[in-house]
Amino acid sequence: MLRLLTIPLGAIFLLLTGVLPAAPAPPAAISLLGNLYFTSAHQGWIEISSSAYYTVGCQSALRAPPACAGGTTGIFSTADGGKTWTERLRVTGAPLVAPHLLPDAWMHAFSSQAILVLPFTDAYNSPARLYRSFDGGRTWQSARIPGPPGFSGPTDLAFAGHRRLWLILHYGAAAGSEQVSLFRTRNAGVHWSRIACIPVQGAQLRCPAPSGLGFGGFKGNIVFANATHGWLTHYDYSGIPSLFVTNDGGYHWTVTRPGLPRGVSGPSPRTGTYPDAQYEQPIPFGHFVVLPTDVNVCTTHPRRNTTCRGTLYALLSFDDGNHWTASRRIPAGANTVRPIWQAMTSHIWWSVDGSRLWATHDAGMHWRPMPLRLPKGQQLFQIQFLSPSVGWAIAGQTSSQSGYARSTTLLRTANGGRSWAVVPLHGVAP
């Protein structure tokens, strides 16, 4: 009987050469800007994460080296427009990578003194924690986020001031459906209570009362305009999304159907055209509400392959979201992982489309393009304008192997985006 002899590759190498192969070097950590939030032209915050988690060595390894599980996230502030930076908070744990290819931490500065930070880390053995400071970052307190480790993401957290927050927890999805719970805190995360959820037969989850939320479809992008009025988006495989609306702080929800943007036709078997739309986070400006809408229209051609075209729109409501009576096309990059745009005010918006920066001063009715003059080889990941002239941005380069950012740069403009200057971050690293 012939028996197959299996010899490890390392042993073969030893037999042939007499030398054991060198162990692969652990992947080196790299530091990346992940987020920024400025409250004025001089006062702002940035997040910098350092980890090997998002390097090629970690993403391509069959068994990730121990170095991939480590990392730190640092929160830094400036009060002089980026000339000097002070580290305010440091959190350990491998930073997760957000849909825009950067490590991510949710943060919101409500004033120069009050700020909330929620780092997203790959710490499945420990729960996520919300950090809060009310003295400009000199001292911090933290509170555990309810639910299992592995928090969902920044679009599952809403607020109405720095003490009232809402949090969506997802319990897994299957066959186009998912179960979620909604939690609320009135004291900046010290205590949380479950105020709404979706009962499922056979599940152990106990819901306070019928909430109006259904099991079908995917829920997210929660936003509150004030302590009582809020929205969350709903997406299913029909390709036409809907909105859940609450007027009692999140206890009860009703579904509304704003529909597709003007000019986008519904599904048509006759023409072989099928739209697939998703609502992003609503953006309220008083009674005026902007509902960003990603639309991907696919058409099946006879004797040809199916082609798809992605476009970003904004549905508009002038009465607190009760009716959506207008829509605008936003010139953002089509079919991108995450469109790069900002509604700075109800009427002044900015958007990035390839090598051009677009601006509108009439809520998207007319757009003005300008060349996006970035440092050579850089692309934009994130923008935040503080005024029609002053803005900040994160730019960088992506890795063709891992798809993640491999370098980042902080930029500032003082002339409405016509030119950008690099803001040095010497010595700023977690």
Image: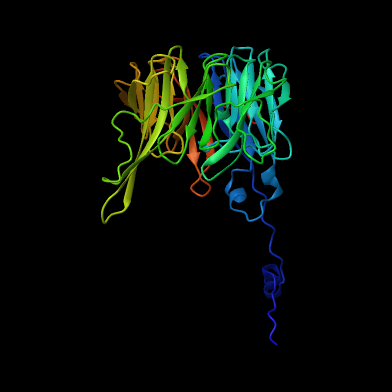
Q: Is residue 64 above or below residue 355?
A: below
Horizontal side, residue 325 vs residue 167: left or right? left
Q: Position of residue 373 (x, y in %)?
A: 38, 29
Q: Is residue 86 visible?
A: no
Q: In this image, 194 relative to 242: left or right? A: right
Q: Quadrant of residue 240?
A: top left
Relative to 274, does residue 105 appear above or below in the rendering? above
What is the quadrant of the C terminus in the image?
top right
- Using the rendered image of the protein, determine whether residue 409 is visible from the camera's viewpoint: yes
Residue 144 on image: x %, y %: 72, 27
Q: Position of residue 107 (x, y in %)?
A: 60, 23
Residue for point 30% across, 23% down: 368
Image quadrant of residue 345?
Answer: top left
Closest to the observer: 9 or 273? 273
Looking at the picture, tell me which residue is in the foreground, 43 or 229: 229
Image side of residue 144 versus residue 292, left or right: right
Colouring scheme, one of rainbow, by chain, secondary structure, one colour = rainbow
Q: Nearer the viewer, residue 214 or 396?
A: 214
Count of labels in the image: 0
237, above or below 120, in the image = below
Q: Residue at x 69, y 58 (%)?
A: 23
The part of the image, by quadrant, that contains residue 28 is top right
Residue 137 locus on image (x, y percent): 67, 17
173 left or right, relative to 2: left
Q: Residue at x 54, y 25 (%)?
A: 222
| Quadrant where the N terminus is found in the figure | bottom right
